Image (cartoon, grey):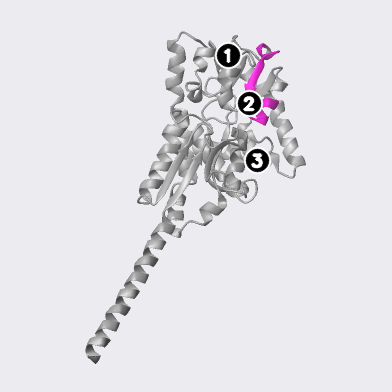
Amino acid sequence: MKFVRRNLLALAGAAGLAALASGFGATQAMAQDVTLRLHQFLPAQANVPKYVLDVWADKVEAESDGRIKIQRFPSMQLGGTPPELIDQAIDGVADIVWTVAGYTPGRFPRAEVFELPFMMTNAEAASKAYWDIAEKYMLDDDFKDFHTIGVWVHGPGLIHSKEPIKSVGDLNGVKLRAPTRVTNMMFSSMGATPVGMPVPAIPEALSKGVVDATVIPWEVAGILKVPELVTNHTEFGDASLYTTSFIFAMNKDRYEGLPDDLKAVIDANSGLEFSAFAGKTMAAYDAPVRKIAVDRGNNIIELTPDEVQEWRDASAGTIDAWVKEMDEKGVDGTGLLEEARGLIAKYTDGN
């Protein structure tokens, strides 16, 4: 009887330990299954959501063996306006956001160096340079309130207008939508009347005459139907009049609260290479939209090098003013400009 009693107690104890271990394991598994909400301002079928953000999210889900689920909320479906996106990431309204740095003017001053006139020559190279600058100066300063997954720029920025714009003088009196503080400074100095607004507002603004022209890359012009709303498109040869800096950010507490192995999945899909991929992908989708405009018979104004030089000369004051402003804020504007240019050249040359 003692033998039987001892064995029954042992079996009961083993069963209890097994149940405890099983329950603990289940709790751990549940704790490690994570759903993250990704919020951004463009329709789901636009190029960036489809070919950058979804690709990133799908890769994270696959590499986490399905333990990370990314819910995608396009077109501001979680509420708010595009300029509020970065604070939504900080405050936890969304877990991850994609946004334009310039939607909150002056908040990320170092990012503006990439938006200066004729700064960007190659989106992939400039995006790599942007990441390097961010990692060196911004992650613990400008970007300290969120976890940065990637930063990048789009391909060559150009002018889309109702009336032809060829020379700087053609901008006089033109109501023009520009994306950032730096581009507003530039176009204002050239005689235009800048009108700030997020990208989704462009079609209505053009159709209602709120603006006469807009500056965006070809890539996003397609989803906004810009080639149907205006008939003139001014290109700057091998140069880029401007570009826009983007931020792909995650709520800091959400990131830091991940188990180490899931954090590693996010880390493996963050940084220099992801930023380069995003910039390169955006630029790759310029050509198909340009073809749409050509096929419609729109007027593609291709400036010659001498004509581009007029725009370079006219925009030089914007660069000088930005450098001076940065110096006054305690940021070495000249040093940052030279470093960014050097990095872009380095990555453009493939080094």
Q: SS of the residue at dot 1?
A: helix
Label 3: how many Cα within 10 Å (few below 14, some 14–19, many 20+): some
Q: Is residue 150 visible?
A: no
Proximity of marks 3 and 1: CB atoms separated by less than 8 Å = no
Residue 199 among those drawn in magenta: no
Which residue corresponds to mark 1?
207
Q: Position of residue 223 (x, y in %)?
A: 48, 23
Alpha carbons under labels 2 and 3: distance apart: 18 Å
Q: Earlier in the sequence, mark 2 or mark 3?
A: 3
Residue 108: mark in rendering: 3
Q: Is residue 281 left or right of residue 332?
A: left
Pick the residue in front: 283 or 23.
23
Q: SS of the residue at dot 3?
A: loop
Q: Nearer the viewer, mark 3 or mark 1?
A: 1
Q: Is residue 266 left or right of residue 311?
A: left
Label 2: how many Cα within 10 Å (few below 14, some 14–19, many 20+): some
Q: Residue at x 55, y 12 (%)?
A: 230
Instruction: Give amino acid for label 1.
Output: Ser
Q: Residue at x 47, y 46 (%)?
A: 36
Q: Earlier in the sequence, mark 1 or mark 2?
A: 2
Q: Earlier in the sequence, mark 3 or mark 1?
A: 3
Which residue corresponds to mark 2?
197
**Looking at this rendering, what residue extends furthest in the front direction?**
1
Q: Position of residue 254 (x, y in %)?
A: 52, 52
Alpha carbons under labels 3 and 1: distance apart: 32 Å
Instruction: Give amino acid for label 3.
Output: Phe
Pick the residue in front: 94 or 348.
94
Segment colored magenta: 170-185
Instruction: Give amino acid for label 2.
Output: Met
Q: SS of the residue at dot 2?
A: loop
Pick the residue in front: 306 or 99.
99
Location of residue 58 by image quarter: top left
